[in-house]
Image (cartoon, helix red, strand yellow):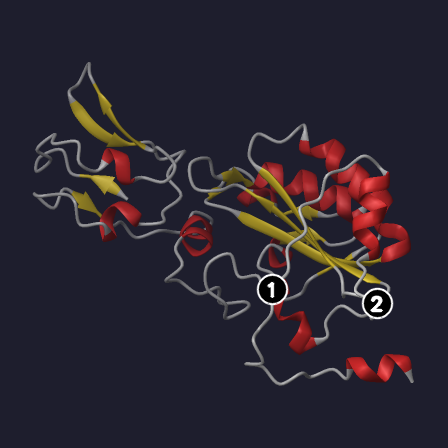
Amino acid sequence: MVIDPATCERCLKCLPVCPVGAIRFERPTKQVVIDQDLCVECEVCYRADVCPSGALQRVELSWPRTLRAVFSNPLLIHKETRIPGRGTEEMKTNDVTGRFKRGQIGIAVELGRPGLSASFRDVEKVTKTCAAHGIQFEPQNPVTHLLKDRIRGTILPEVLDERVLSAIVEFEIEQTAALVLLKDLQAISRELDTVFSLNVTQLVEPDGSVPMLDMLRAEGLSPSPNGKNNMGLGQPAYDFGAEGE
């Protein structure tokens, strides 16, 4: 996105709608500008239709800047996964897909949020930490398609300086190995220049317990347990009942 200085009326109505604070008023030049390093190409300012003169203008993006738009604009679709936005299948669908079995843990590491955003340099710190534990990255996650080396967790060098509204690193791991990895992620989170959210998914045991909650609490962590149900709107693709046979 850019602002046409010839038609901009300096009304400043666009400043508060930018989710990452990329639009600013420069007092020396008395111009409203978009910081191209901070802009994540989400087009929220354009879709908000707050500019009375039409000074907010779309521009044709080229690689790798196109990544900003496809990760940050929920109306766009990743060509690799055919999924919009950040492109990660919600873990809450596990009761239908059976993606995580008993003894397995699903982990999603989210970097960035509206108000801050995230760079792929920070995303790479997370992917390299995870790769060191030998995990397999979720193939339907768009971050996985940006990995130059999935064994080492390195990201394509040409995209490292791109910023997005948020990105998610997703994978699964055996419960017995999860705790060590989570500790390493907790340590690397202190080096990130963005918001870091860690999501852990596990099947509820037949007795209603969630083993990972007790394991995390025993390590002095304070997980926030959340549960979601799909209200019977999906047909299970995995026979969970067969696990006890």
- Quickly name the residue at label 2: 207
- Can you tell which mark lies on residue 228? 1
Looking at the rendered structure, the kind of residue marked 2 is: Asp
Residue drawn at x 76%, y 61% as measured from the top left: 202
Residue 224 located left or right of residue 184: left
Check disc 2 and report its element: helix, strand or loop. loop
Looking at the rendered structure, the kind of residue marked 1 is: Lys
On-image quarter of the C terminus: bottom right
Q: Residue furthest front?
A: 207
Residue 38 located left or right of residue 120: left
Q: Is residue 152 visible?
A: no
Task: Please name which of the two marks, 2 or 1, marks the residue nearer to the observer.
Answer: 2
Residue 165 located left or right of residue 110: left
Sort mark 1 into few (<14), some (14-19) or many (20+) by Cα contacts within 10 Å.
Answer: few
Residue drawn at x 17%, y 31% as measured from the top left: 12
Check disc 1 and report its element: helix, strand or loop. loop
